[in-house]
Image: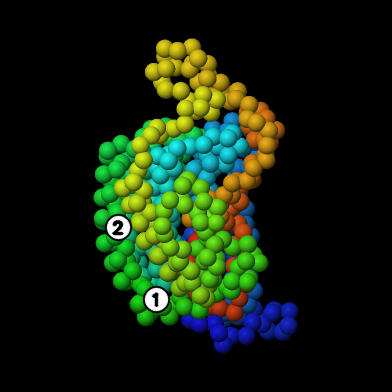
Amino acid sequence: MSTENYTIIHPEDTDKHYTTLNLGPTHPATHGIFQNILTMDGEMVIDAEQTIGYIHRAFEKIAEHRPYYQITPLTDRLNYCSSPINNIGYQLAVEKLLGIKTNKRIDYMRVIIMELSRIADHLVCNSVIGVDSGALTGFVYIFQEREFIYEIFEEICGARLTTNIGRIGGFDRDFSPAVIHKIRQFLVRYEKALHEFENLFIRNRIFMDRTIKVGPISAERALAYGFTGPNLRAAGVDYDVRVASPYCSYNDFDFIIPVGTHGDTYDRFCVRQTEMWQSMKIIKDALDNLPQGDHIVREPFAVLPKKEDVYSKMEALIWHFKIVMGEIDAPKGEIYHSVEGGNGELGFYLVSEGGRAPYRLHFRRPCFIYYQAYPEMIKGGLLSDAIITMSSMNVIAGELDA
């Protein structure tokens, strides 16, 4: 399905009749609610124009009217394939504003949860690439492992998809023995499943023909658009927020940043596959070396006191009331903090003028930034290539619109 012999023709340069095709907003191949208006010459894409905003929910405006601790559930609904990364990224931003420093145990617990989320995110993306190339078996098989990750999340916080996991300053509860057991069980079973999944695709001639040289983008163009994450690394740029600006003690872990060469669909698939292996290594290292310590920073102005203290101590009752009612004044300031999300640099630009809620909170969503390159990546290719290119970019509608 290579496009190297195609010449891109602009509709205004010829009198030839072209077909306008609506790809979305509710087409199942878009994997979300967004529209692409394609100008087609038979099966070839001549031009494309996106329309976004179908599930815009005004999160940034809502955040201006909510106390800081009530904003975490909003972040669930960004990239809902890896909600805990969004949750923890926001909590880290608030901690940076408040000057809260967490201990190593909290950092390692966060790393474990974020890497499990990264695996769940990449698992969805790569299995869907398989579906859009005509291979359903891998998708059905590997999704069992995603369900098991959700069982781990459920054991930790009681939720599965939109998790609201963790708190500003750490976690509301420590990892139980059941959580530790489930994570170790997952590492064993997923290693076998991931090997089998790779054997279905990596050297499969049909899959390679459907993905190599499909939807390519150069490193220069990717950087010009502002790409980050697996889509940028697939183009050959080894930028990873976990290494460039370490957080949560990521500098304690030794892992490889995989990069591609052509920035095509096959490279994006391979980069995510390798990242899943690296995530499993990080989780194992963090679990084997989990430090001792408390699961939350006991800062009364930011963290709910223990329930038994609220029942018996006036000071704890006062702080509990002030936090729940949003009567804690944050310091004035302006900060930016980013984490390596499933799709790239997920940033939180937070402006505080004191008071109970942010003056301004902006989410830097990687999907919103790299989706603008989609028309350039599919022009001159076939319609079937446009579908699989979108899958390999992993455009999540919730993160795109916010």
Q: Amino acid at mark 1?
A: Phe
**Residue 181 vs residue 149: left or right?**
left
Q: Amino acid at mark 2?
A: Tyr
Res. 19 visible in picture = no
Q: Position of residue 155 (x, y in %)?
A: 33, 39
Which residue is under mark 1? Answer: 207
Res. 379 visible in picture = yes
Q: Residues within 10 Å of mark 1 (few under 14, many from 20)?
A: some
Residue nearest the observer in this picture, 235 or 44: 235
In the structure shown, which secondary structural element does the residue marked by tag 2 occupy?
helix
Q: Position of residue 220 (x, y in %)?
A: 63, 71
Residue furthest right as drawn: 12
Q: Residues within 10 Å of mark 2 (few under 14, many from 20)?
A: many
Residue nearest the observer in this picture, 207 or 329: 329
Q: Position of residue 354 (x, y in %)?
A: 68, 30
- Residue at 42% x, 22% y is 306
Which residue is under mark 2? Answer: 190
- Residue at 60% x, 65% y is 36
- Residue at 69% x, 79% y is 10
Quarter-wise, where is residue 358 in the image? top right
- Residue at 58% x, 53% y is 365
Mark 2 vs 1, N-terminal side: 2
